[in-house]
Amino acid sequence: MTRLDTLVRAPVDLTGYRLGAPQRAGALTMVPIHGPERPGIVPPRSGLKLNRVAGYGSVELHNGAPAGVAIVPLHIGYIQDSAQNHALCSAALLGAGETRMFTDACCVQAAQGGYLEGRDQWFFMLPVELRPRALALTGQVGYSKLWPEIAALNRRYQLPARGHLEQLLTRKRAVLTQFRSRLELLPGQLGALFFVGERFAGLEIAPDTRYFAEMWMPLVCFAYGVAAWHAEPERAEAEPFAAGDLAGLRAELERDRAEQAEQVLSWMSAPTEVRMVEQERYLDLRLHTVTGDGITGQLVGEHDRVVYASLFAAN
């Protein structure tokens, strides 16, 4: 396996993280990441709870676990029945039993009547096209602050130019959820590199496999699936292998996989400069915002080791 630290320049130690064989689903390529786990972090779906939405732009979260720190994922969005839905601008650290009100959340519906359907979907992630702007809006109060970008994204995808994110997440959900079935979450996987076409889209690392498993559908279908759906290539007829026996076929498959892996890794170019600003801390955990040449996002480190990372293309 290829070492992640040979491809990604990060302000934390990535030693021990390894890349698996790339998987492709249309325009979306996912490279699984395996590595050291950091136990004791509360996962986002089974441990972190949405208490309430207290009016537009204010979302209250609660870490209901009896022990352990909850890392609120960057750009998580919550489904709220009979109320408009919101997404957070920043990640956060919540101690066991802690409740916090986030007053700088983004409303993702420009008017009443466009609720996201919450029957079988607990939370979503903002599409990568919206993530750089959402991160830049951290700390800025104003529930409608992301509506212009949502409207522009809808217009780009030939949908009504309104600040309604559900036009993508709900109406296109049947298409987007195909990425979950076409890409395989592997045993022991706790992260992934994502590419749309031949361009780097994002790097996601979770504290452990359970945390990443709970993030899998929102990341694949929503955070990166929207851009991949829009960039879906025309289907081409696959060239048949020339092998005449089973051993030859296996050899050709191995060569094809090696060539694909080499091609995918060539798409990853490390930024020339990476800057990191601390946002908050809890015990030895530090939440930082990261910016670089064409990349931005946030990560959580502990004693210079990465615990959580969500970095994505800045343009």
Image: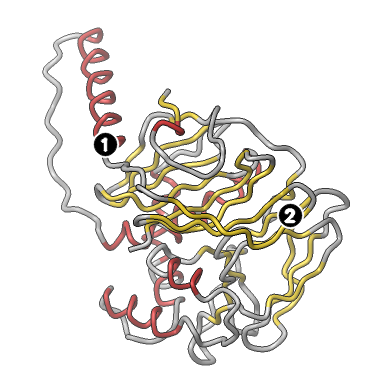
Which residue in the structure is indicated by mark 1? 266
The kind of residue on which mark 2 rests is: Ala
The kind of residue on which mark 1 rests is: Ser
Which residue in the structure is indicated by mark 2? 70
Q: What count of labels does the image hold?
A: 2
Expressed as whole percent of the image width and height from the top left, the position of residue 203 reads: 45, 47
Q: Secondary structure at mark 1?
A: helix
Cα distance between the residues tagged 2 and 1: 35 Å
Q: Nearest the camera: 134 or 43?
A: 134
**Where 306 sits versus 64, above or below?**
above
Q: Is residue 117 left or right of residue 284?
A: left
Expressed as whole percent of the image width and height from the top left, the position of residue 295 reads: 40, 56
Quarter of the rendering occupied by the C terminus:
bottom left
Q: Nearest the camera: 34 or 132?
A: 132
Expressed as whole percent of the image width and height from the top left, the position of residue 138 reads: 56, 73
Q: Residues within 10 Å of mark 2 (few under 14, many from 20)?
A: many
Expressed as whole percent of the image width and height from the top left, the position of residue 216 reads: 53, 49
Q: Secondary structure at mark 2?
A: strand
Residue at image location 50% in from the left, 84% down from the top = 109
Question: In terms of image quadrants, where is residue 80?
Answer: bottom right
**Where 233 sits versus 266, above or below?**
below
Quarter of the rendering occupied by the N terminus:
top left
Q: Is residue 2 left or right of residue 261?
A: right
Q: Nearest the camera: 79 or 43?
A: 43
Residue at image location 39% in from the left, 85% down from the top = 148
Residue at image location 55% in from the left, 27% down from the top = 16
